[in-house]
Image (cartoon, rainbow, N blue to C red):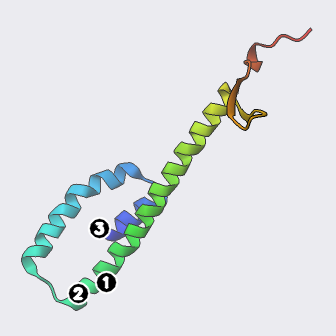
Amino acid sequence: MLDLEREALIAADFEALATFVQQKEDLLAQLEKTIPAKDILRPVRQKMDENLALMAAVIKGVAAAGERLAALQNVKSGLSVYDNAGRLEHVRTHNPALEKKA
């Protein structure tokens, strides 16, 4: 399961990741009942830590993409500049798609 999760994280397959939630919960419940030895849990813990690092990177990447899209949307509507007093001012731009050429 952890290997499949890793592959889905690397491929950014968010739909697959969503389907793993219930399966992982079931596996963890089974694991709690059996109480395996530490030497068995060690590689599991290592894979979980690796997947957690990948998940953090995915979240950071998605957040950065969202910020970039927001910035691009702001550029479409205008330009932010500083005036002579050092205050931030938003200057609206016109829509170049509607511009007529002679």
Point out the frontmost of discs 1 and 3.
Answer: 1
User: Real-space Cα distance between discs 1 and 3?
Assistant: 13 Å
Against 62, residue 73 (above or below) is above
Query: Which residue, given by chain and number where applicable, does mark 3 sit on?
Result: 1
Residue 80 horizontal/vertical position (percent): 70, 33
State the mark number for residue 40: 2
Q: Are marks 1 and 2 in contact (CB under 8 Å)?
A: yes
User: Real-space Cα distance between discs 2 and 3?
Assistant: 15 Å
Q: Residues within 10 Å of mark 3 (few under 14, many from 20)?
A: few
Residue appearing at x 20%, y 56% in the figure = 22
Against 73, residue 59 (above or below) is below
State the mark number for residue 43: 1
Q: Earlier in the sequence, mark 2 or mark 3?
A: 3
Against 67, residue 88 (above or below) is above
In front: 91, or 3?
91
Residue appearing at x 61%, y 32% in the figure = 73
Q: Looking at numbered disc 3 in the image, what kind of residue is underneath it?
A: Met
Q: Is residue 65 left or right of residue 12?
A: right
In front: 25, or 79?
79
Q: Are marks 2 and 3 in contact (CB under 8 Å)?
A: no
Q: Quadrant of the C terminus?
A: top right
Residue appearing at x 75%, y 13% in the figure = 98
User: Real-space Cα distance between discs 1 and 2?
Assistant: 7 Å
Choose top left, top right, bottom left or bottom right for residue 92.
top right
Q: Looking at numbered disc 2 in the image, what kind of residue is underneath it?
A: Ile
